[in-house]
Amino acid sequence: MNRFGNRFSFTTFGESHGKAVGVIIDGVPAGIEVDEKFIQSEMDRRKPGKNSFATARKEGDVVEILSGVFEGKTTGTSLAMIVFNENQKSKDYSNIKDLFRPSHADFTYFNKYGVRDYRGGGRSSARETLARVSAGAIAKLMLKSLNIEIISGVSYIGGVGSDSYDFDFAKKSEIYSLSPQFEEKQKKMILKAKDSHNSLGGTVFVRVKNAPIGLGEPVYYKLDAILADAMMGINGVKGVEIGLGKDSTLIKGSENNDQMDIDGFVTNNSGGILGGISNGENIDIKVHFKPTPSIFVEQTTQDIYGGVHNMSLKGRHDPIIAVRGSVVAEAMASLVIADMILLNMGRKIDEIKKYYQ
């Protein structure tokens, strides 16, 4: 499946070393003002080659809108966007044409389809996520008109970080760190892993602000379930938590429950979701990324014929997925909330009658 979403949905296409990567978005309401500078700024946050903490692959990631916009506003029809690849080095992968890279999708793609694009992973490459970020920018433009904001940053790198979140600092940080007190140490850890031809894992924190009460479709399209689905679909994500997440297993019900007073909820351990439906509080999501599997340490693997080999990778790879992955997680949260907003509009017959009468 290359499609995600229900009412506000998108389909991506393209490969890492192909001609282009793009997206087609359906269900975008007409009349949204399309700020192309904003869309490009979102792409720039994710693009590679910006500093020493990311892959050296140089891509402009310039997004081009092909359809669905007229005179600066969405038309309500399919909105298509494309980014042409500029800096592929497919020869870097010629030595592993018949080898399965450890902890990549090479083995599963080959066994599922009987063929695989070995140049950077093809369709399984994280380069596909630029399409999600461009789609997420459109969702953000829609949500902005409703005063809904989605923000993110990196809370932990290699286990070092904090559960205090400084989003303003993250916007200025080269690694989108949410922790002013830990950013320098986190940077040093990334560079050390990079210098030793290795990689690190990390945790991303995403917050949805000002989401209305009522988002989420019981029983099989719950808000937290679809958010987890969206995050787990991002390359390298191995775990997702809402609110307290796994820490709620360590405390009693009397400590975990979000009690209420005259002003509303006293705490937000639920992460803004109860029974799969938003409760008006901040929606808090933790996304855990594994270390980048593309490392330059010699490893043992199989070839497509079952033989065992020692292999060494070439190419240009991120020493950590979580940094640029935070932008993708933020985009996916935006797409889920936009979808839920549109789904929620049909919840009461009185509101439907009001619209049509």
Image (cartoon, rainbow, N blue to C red):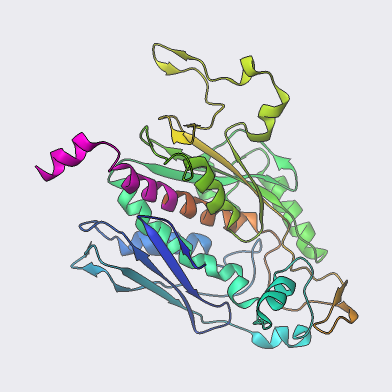
Main SS, magenta residues: helix
Q: Position of residue 308 (x, y in %)?
A: 90, 79
Residue 103, given in percent of the width and then of the height, sits at: 76, 65
Q: Residue furthest top?
A: 262
Magenta stretch holds residue 350: yes
The structure residue drawn at horizontal position 40% and vertical position 71%, both measured from the top left corner, is 63
Is residue 146 shown above or below 135? above
The quadrant of the rendering that contains the C terminus is: top left
Question: How many marks on residues?
Answer: 0
Q: Is residue 346 magenta?
A: yes
Q: Position of residue 293 (x, y in %)?
A: 74, 65
Residue closer to the observer: 29 or 181: 29
Magenta span of residues: 335-357
Residue at the outermost left position: 357
Which quadrant of the view contains residue 107? bottom right
What residue appears at the point 89 percent right and 82 percent down from the top-left corner?
Answer: 307
Q: Is residue 291 left or right of residue 334?
A: right
Answer with left or right where residue 247 lies relative to residue 296: left
In the depicted structure, whether residue 322 falls above or below residue 215:
below
Residue 154 lies, in percent from the top left, at: 61, 47
Q: Is residue 48 left or right of residue 302?
A: left
Residue at 51% from the left image edge and 15% from the top image edge: 259
Q: Is residue 272 left or right of residue 203?
A: left
Residue 332 visible to the viewer = yes
Q: Determine if residue 60 is in view.
A: no
